[in-house]
Amino acid sequence: MSTTHLMEPVTFSESGGIPYLHFGTELIQGAMRIRDPDEIYLEYNQQMMAWLLFLETKPEMRVAQLGLGTCALTKFQHHYCPAVKTTVVELNPAVIVSSRSMFFTPDDDRKLETLQTDTKQFVKDKKQDKFDAVPVD
């Protein structure tokens, strides 16, 4: 994620069993249906997973997810894509804490690595690494 929201407060709202994440405004940054937390609820997040339609499955796939939000992509990949190892890069520690405490992000394990760092620095440091997909939010 960019530094534009780093100092903005991480706030929340809820309506009809859907908690929403905001960065200091009413604009929705993420959402989760409580009765199905692994579902990708927002349409734009669904579209961000289109890369699955274009890649052949292989024994291990690597995804660098730039930005965490409510972890919709992370949870979906962790739950439904056993071959995917996800590295999530998020600058704002409040987003990481809220994703784990309110939006049910799984703990880091062999399929998930969460890094609190600037995405620009991550991309610069990892430019020689190979990722099958790089969703950017």
Image (cartoon, grey):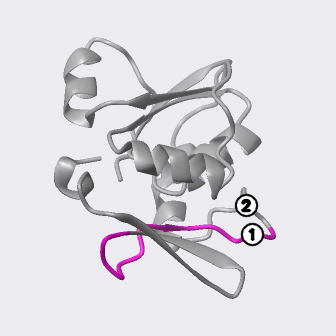
Q: Quadrant of residue 5?
A: bottom left
Q: Amino acid at mark 1?
A: Ile
Q: Seen in the image, is 53 located left or right of residue 57?
A: left
- Residue visible at 23% across and 55% down in the picture: 7
Q: Is residue 127 above or below residue 36?
A: above
- Residue visible at 56% across and 51% down in the picture: 99
Report the number of discs.
2
Range drawn in magenta: 23-35
Around disc 2, counting alpha carbons within 10 Å, would you say few (fewer than 14), some (14 to 19), or many (20 or more)?
A: some
Instruction: Report which residue position mark 1 lands on.
Output: 34
- Residue visible at 53% across and 36% down in the picture: 55
Viewer-proximal residue, 11 or 80?
A: 11
Q: Is residue 130 above or below residue 72?
A: above
Q: What secondary structure is the stretch in magenta mostly built from? A: loop
- Residue visible at 63% across and 67% down in the picture: 32
Identify the disc placed on residue 72. none
Which residue is farthest top? 128
